[in-house]
């Protein structure tokens, strides 16, 4: 909807807009790519990106032989940016793509990108796999992308990335570009990340994720990791736990540093998020964590991810990220050398920490009247407290006590 047309009359006439250039409602079109992955009777299923079809009220699927079919959304998922479209045809000879094994993809492999770049229908470009395991967290995607230098442009989204055997190894999703065009930095979702979603879309119309109820932090600060006894171990820090969630019930604690899940080593937060998401509800998962510099195993019964629960910050304990006071922190906050404690950072709204009266940049010096000088002692006292918790904090040159929180 628009109030006033932004361009001159010839532009509107070209696109079929009203000649008076006035306000009104207009229908816009977008184009993306897809790949046919399955058939059930007359119904064909096409995988594409969620951002290709998001918000559409009409979908048309055009095959490489120019035939068009009305399409409908079977299921879509924003976290992985994938969607499944269906169309029907009496023709049972329409070929299906063969899905490969993206876990075997290696840097240097020859690959091909197919799609409709810039509106040029059924285009193929060739390149190599530039890298694997690229993080998508910066664009809000939980996948570990395959990077390729095969030319990918707008319109390629949702199209397949193929290996030399013609097998689909990924779905082209985004490019890194300063100009808006291809600069040899294309990224595809590994097909193994999508296979499970295809089955879930067809069976239930949505993607289903496992959930344990923790907030994770990627921690690269050496002093922080040293306090946890994890300076030489890759992993993911549990900064907060949802009260009443599977992690809380199973005994996972704030300050735990996850180094393995079901016997598989954890390299970073993104991997742990993906691996937990791939677990089935009611499945028992074994987390190996560093706690008080010792390795501990925690068994948790996984639940199904529910967005309402995930977004309820009022149950996020303790509601902030604890940070050790190093020289940079001391200088930035003008803290005296005599002040020992833990910095309150990234305080989340509506959480227990806020309810207690904590503020950003408070320095916690005691938990239930027991002094804390490092992360280890903070988490020990925090997790040992049974029923109620009280913080003493250093704030603006004064020591104040928070309201007691009853767990």
Image (cartoon, rainbow, N blue to C red):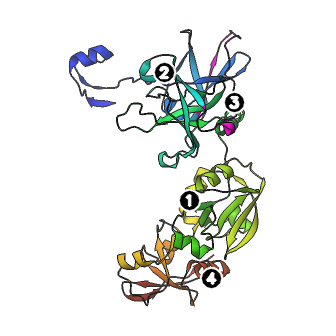
Taking the spot 59% from the left edge, 52% from the top edge, the residue there is: 270
What range of the chain is rendered magenta?
83-109
Question: Which quarter of the rendering shows the C terminus?
Answer: bottom right
Gap between marks 1 and 2, in whole Å? 41 Å
Q: Does 77 lie within the magenta span?
A: no
Q: Up-down: is 283 above or below 300?
A: above
Residue occupied by mark 3 = 100
Taking the spot 46% from the left edge, 25% from the top edge, the residue there is: 155
Q: Secondary structure at mark 3?
A: loop
Earlier in the chain: of badge 4 and badge 3, it is 3
Gap between marks 4 and 2, in whole Å? 58 Å
Viewed as shown, does residue 347 lie left or right of 79? left
Q: Which mark is residue 381?
A: 4
Earlier in the chain: of badge 4 and badge 2, it is 2
Residue occupied by mark 1 = 312
Place of residue 78 in the rendered image (x, y in percent of width and height, measured from the top left): 55, 41
Mark 1 in CB contact with mark 2 (< 8 angstroms):
no
Nearer the observer: mark 4 or 1; the answer is 4
């Amino acid at each position: 909807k628009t109030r006033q047309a932004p361009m001159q009359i010839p532009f509107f006439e070209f696109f079929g807009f009203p000649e008076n250039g006035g306000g009104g409602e207009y229908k816009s079109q977008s184009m993306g790519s897809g790949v046919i992955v399955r058939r059930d009777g007359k119904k064909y299923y096409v995988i594409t990106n969620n951002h290709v079809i998001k918000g559409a009220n009409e979908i048309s699927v055009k095959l490489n032989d120019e035939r068009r079919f009305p399409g409908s959304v079977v299921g879509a998922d924003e976290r992985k940016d994938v969607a499944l479209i269906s169309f029907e045809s009496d023709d049972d000879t329409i070929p299906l793509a063969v899905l490969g094994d993206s876990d075997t993809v290696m840097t240097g492999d020859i690959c091909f990108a197919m799609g409709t770049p810039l509106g040029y229908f059924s285009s193929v470009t060739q390149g190599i796999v530039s890298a694997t395991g690229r993080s998508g967290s910066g664009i809000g995607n939980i996948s570990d992308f395959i990077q390729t230098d095969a030319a990918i442009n707008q319109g390629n989204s949702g199209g397949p990335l193929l290996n030399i055997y013609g097998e689909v190894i990924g779905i082209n999703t985004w490019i890194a570009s300063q100009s808006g065009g291809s600069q040899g930095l294309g990224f595809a979702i590994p097909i193994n990340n999508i296979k499970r979603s295809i089955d879930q879309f067809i069976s239930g119309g949505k993607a289903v994720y496992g959930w344990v109820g923790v907030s994770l932090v990627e921690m690269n600060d050496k002093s922080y990791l040293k306090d946890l006894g994890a300076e030489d171990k890759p992993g993911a820090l549990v900064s907060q736990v949802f009260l009443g969630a599977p992690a809380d019930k199973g005994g996972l604690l704030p300050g735990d540093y996850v180094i393995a899940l079901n016997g598989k080593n954890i390299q970073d937060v993104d991997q742990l998020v993906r691996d937990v998401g791939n677990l089935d509800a009611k499945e028992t998962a074994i987390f190996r964590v560093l706690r008080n510099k010792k390795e501990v195993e925690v068994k948790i019964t996984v639940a199904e991810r529910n967005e309402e629960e995930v977004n309820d910050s009022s149950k996020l304990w303790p509601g902030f990220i604890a940070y050790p006071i190093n020289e940079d922190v001391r200088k930035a906050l003008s803290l005296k050398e005599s002040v020992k404690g833990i910095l309150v950072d990234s305080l989340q709204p509506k959480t227990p920490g806020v309810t207690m009266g904590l503020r950003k940049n408070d320095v916690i010096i005691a938990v239930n009247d027991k002094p804390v000088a490092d992360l280890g002692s903070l988490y020990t006292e925090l997790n040992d407290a049974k029923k109620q918790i009280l913080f003493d904090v250093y704030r603006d040159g004064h020591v104040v006590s928070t309201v007691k929180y009853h767990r």
